[in-house]
Amino acid sequence: MSGSTTTGGATTGGTTTGLERAVADVLARDACSGCGLCSRLDRSVRMELDAQGYARPVFSGPSEPVPDAEAIFRRGCPGVVVKAPTPPRGATPHALLGAHLGVWNAGATDTEIRHTGSSGGALTALHTWLVETGRAARVTGAAVDAAAPRRTVPVSIMTREQALSAAGSRYAPVAALDNDDVLAPGSAVCAKPCEISALRQTAADLIDGEPPLMLSFFCAGTPSQHATDALLSELGVGRHAEVGALRYRGRGWPGRFTATSGDREVSADYDESWGRTLGPTTQWRCKVCVDAVGEAADIVSADSWESDEHGYPTFADGAGVSALIARTERGRRTILEAEAAGVIELGPLSMDRLAAAQPLQTERRRFLRARLLGSLLAGRRPPRYPGYALLRLSATAPRMAARVLRGTFRRVRRAAR
């Protein structure tokens, strides 16, 4: 056991545990996704914002790992490895968006939930139904920090009101696994794909009995917290000004970034908020993510965008529509039971249609092998992604793959300097 104090995984004195060394390696490679798994493996770990505005593990005192913590970490940390899930029997494969047992356009039947959510409110409707019917004792997820609305924090949802408070995207760092309730019996978990992958790989080690129902969503990456503060400043809300409320999306589709400060309300449209300010600051681990589409989850939601004549999503404001994907039989059964209960409405959707509406996800997956190789050649070792057939995907467009490789190499080298 260590008698040292460790900050951000870097030991300041004394000996270190195997977990500390493993965490330090992930941080040194800039491969941390900020999921919070290590806080479930060591009682001394806290998740804090680093100087760049991303959630990172900090050893606040002598390391206190759970049994086999290092082995569990190396098996589940998304900065070490993400294994392709084994598709369930009867699943239909899709090279870019993963295997599925069903895919639908979906929306909450409750108009308040649908309006409040980021798209069709399907996940929020499921959260509410799960806790109100006792199918889950709670749903753990993320929501605005009521005490400091600029920030996002892990939460446990047990009521409709709490589900509504957590509705909508949070384009900011939050470690959803940094919540004791994630491992509590009877919980369901809604989290980013990297967090769900970590939980899926380690649930048998950390949870007695059946693993939680796992819900996720298509993820474009985690922006820096500094980007939220910068956007507020651009809108006239200074860094030290008190913020009364903050939403990234919702109340319309795709919805506007809105914040209140005193008696003022400021806002920006989706292109300005995500496209110009938040999106460009996504952390490096997200740029080399193999599974931003939640293949390890039971249920995944996404924006089912309409596309223009070039296949690019259109962001005209309107009534939101979610895509729902059942990755497992448990997920398929849950979706169909929710529809039968009148909680959500479902309509036809194909995976190819959804792929056309999600070019960021499909292009990231298609050329990820080239990006990983460019990073490795530039001296930054990425995570391992066994089972995803990435070389085969990049081979379909070798010239573009070569361009992506060169671009990644140059960016990593420039960052190292």
Image: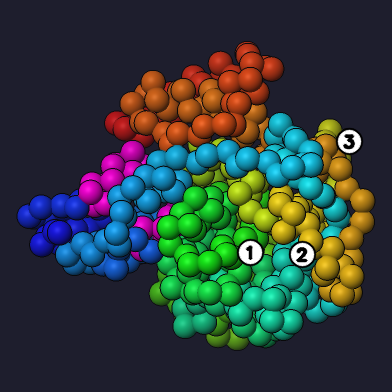
Residue at (36%, 34%) from the top-left corner?
415
Mark 3 or mark 1: name the one nearer the start of the chain: 1
- CB under 8 Å between discs 3 and 2: no
Q: Nearer the viewer, mark 3 or mark 2?
A: 2
Q: Which residue is mark 3?
A: 309
Label 1: few (<14), some (14–19) or many (≥20) C-alpha neighbours in 10 Å = some
The residue singled out by tag 2 in the image is: 334
* Magenta-colored span: 18-39
Q: Nearer the viewer, mark 3 or mark 1?
A: 1
What predominant SS class does the magenta segment belong to?
helix
Q: In terms of depth relative to the viewer, which is nearer, 205 or 249? A: 205
Report whether 4 appears left or right of 344.
left
| Sequence-first tag of 3 and 2 | 3
Q: Quadrant of the C terminus?
A: top left
Asked if disc 2 and disc 1 are in contact, CB closer than 8 Å, the reply is yes
Q: Residue type at mark 2?
A: Thr
Q: Which mark is residue 213?
A: 1
Residue, x 79% and y 61% (percent of image)? 333
Q: Give residue 136's position: percent from left, percent from top.
A: 65, 76
Figure check: 86 above or below 269: above
Q: Secondary structure at mark 2?
A: helix
Q: Secondary structure at mark 1?
A: strand
Q: Left of 68 or right of it: where is 120?
A: right
Residue 145 as seen in the image, left or right of residue 132: left
Residue 388, compared with residue 275, is above or below; it is: above
Q: Position of residue 95 (x, y in %)?
A: 71, 31
Residue 109 visible somewhere in the drawing? no
Kindly give the residue lying farthest to the left in the view shown.
14
Query: Residue farthest to the top?
Result: 399
- Give, as a three-letter code, the residue at label 3: Glu
The x, y position of residue 313, in whole percent, is 79, 44
